Image (tube, rainbow, N blue to C red):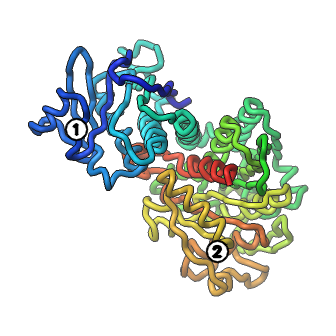
Amino acid sequence: MPQIIEVTTRKGDPAETSSDTRVVGLFVDEPSGIESIDKLVESGEVKASYKSTGVVRSHSQRFVTVGMGKRDEFTNERARIVGAAAVTAAKGLGAKTLSASGPDTEDLSGTAAAFAEGVILKNYVFDAYKSKSDDDDGDGDDGFITSLEIVTDADIADAVKIGVASANAANRARDLQNQPSNVATPTYLGERASAIAAEHGLELELHDRDWIVDKGMGAFAAVAKGAVEEPRLIVLKYNGAGASGPTLGFVGKAVTFDTGGISLKPSGKMEEMKFDMSGGAAVLEATAAIAELGLPINLISVVPSTENMPDANATKPGDIVTAYNGKTIEIDNTDAEGRLILADALTYAIELGAERVVNLATLTGAIIVALGSTYAGIFSNDDEWAAAVEAAGDATGELGHRLPLHPEFADLIKGKYADISNAPGSRKGSSITAAEFLKNFVGDTPWTHLDIAGTAWDLGRNYVGSGASGFGTRLLVELAREHGES
């Protein structure tokens, strides 16, 4: 499990702390109020430029200074980055406990919450399979920050609580992502869902291969045919106290390993295909955080999970299957499997009562060409719902950029022998045609699709670095929070 930091807030004198290291944020051309630090800033030994760090020892206290840059350029995303920079500097000193203070900002609660997120996310390390070194004392916190105190004159506790829960959820999602696929099987994800349900009192459905086939989910079943590992359709239902708005539906793709099936992928970097369950990981852990926070919403989370393997029983290019909503599909490329399992999961989520749906999926390599690792692709049949999802991404730094849907793209996925094709021969707008495919399974329900293939791992931001990013987890929590307050 991820390293847990105890986060507290208090008012009062920042100097009155038992933490071993104080973190002080510095704006350019503004005094910190700590004489020894301000003298070093004047001499140039300590800098307030964005992301720069310094170490100061004064009056038996140790300070890590972090440059916040110019005040008019400061954002909550910068606060996350500053928090991560503070962790890097503090770890280099062997620090364990931090107390943070700094100049006021216009959105002090948001800044404090974002700073805490940056600290928690940066503190994460996945070392479950590393041999312990001889100097490991066995206390479980070697090399990690164990506590963070945030000192301000404002009431920030509620905002920080949400930020902490969101960041911890993202780190749990990263743990699921980083597990090897021989561990993180569909059954393993089902067990994690069972644990979430038990901890938070949620309703749970766990369905196996026979149920999926008998239910008529031909698209999902087709992907699972080649896998010895049992597939799972995972459903979690959360009913928040005081909920009044439309029921949300979160759907996350969870292909726990994707070989491409008969349309086999190249061997280079195939090991990264353990990350093809990243959407499902985000949905599971966001659901847990939403329940932990007791947000006033109703939520149905659906995670279709399977491996995609080239067994002798595997689906072949050219096979035709019938999806749960009755649409027939030509499977022209078995490596376009994510949209197949999502098709039946989206239909089922809406059947269960979801009235506003968002799905997350590492769906297309083409989205990386279009948007790199900075933005996820956003596709939607509803402008208002798309804007809400995009706003949640902006608030959390999990950015999305909306791309168009259009009847001409929809025409590209028309099948030759069936209603639609999962992989049209034309390479035009590949990410968009994948979204047009999914649109066939949501009807008139407001729906937004997030293609996170470029952001789910190796995002590169300093607070998540390489490996799993947990992308989308914090976005979903923020979306639920805003939905509950609307």
| Residue 107 horizontal side relative to residue 360, left or right | left
Q: What residue type is labelled 1?
A: Pro
Q: Give the x, y percent position of residue 231.
A: 75, 48
Residue matched to label 2:
423
- Disc 2 is placed on an element classified as loop
Q: In which quarter of the image is the C terminus?
A: bottom right
* Residue found at x 82% / y 63%: 218
Residue matched to label 1:
31
Residue 379 numbered tag: none
Farthest residue in the right direction?
214
Front-most of residues 237 and 176: 237
Sequence-first tag of 2 and 1: 1
| Residue 109 horizontal side relative to residue 354, left or right | left
Farthest residue in the left direction?
43
* Residue found at x 58% / y 77%: 404
Q: How packed is label 1: few (under 14 Cα within 10 Å), some, or many (20 or more)?
A: some
* Residue found at x 19% / y 41%: 47
Front-most of residues 389 and 215: 389
Is residue 247 visible in the rendered structure shown here? yes
Q: Give the x, y percent position of residue 174.
A: 54, 41
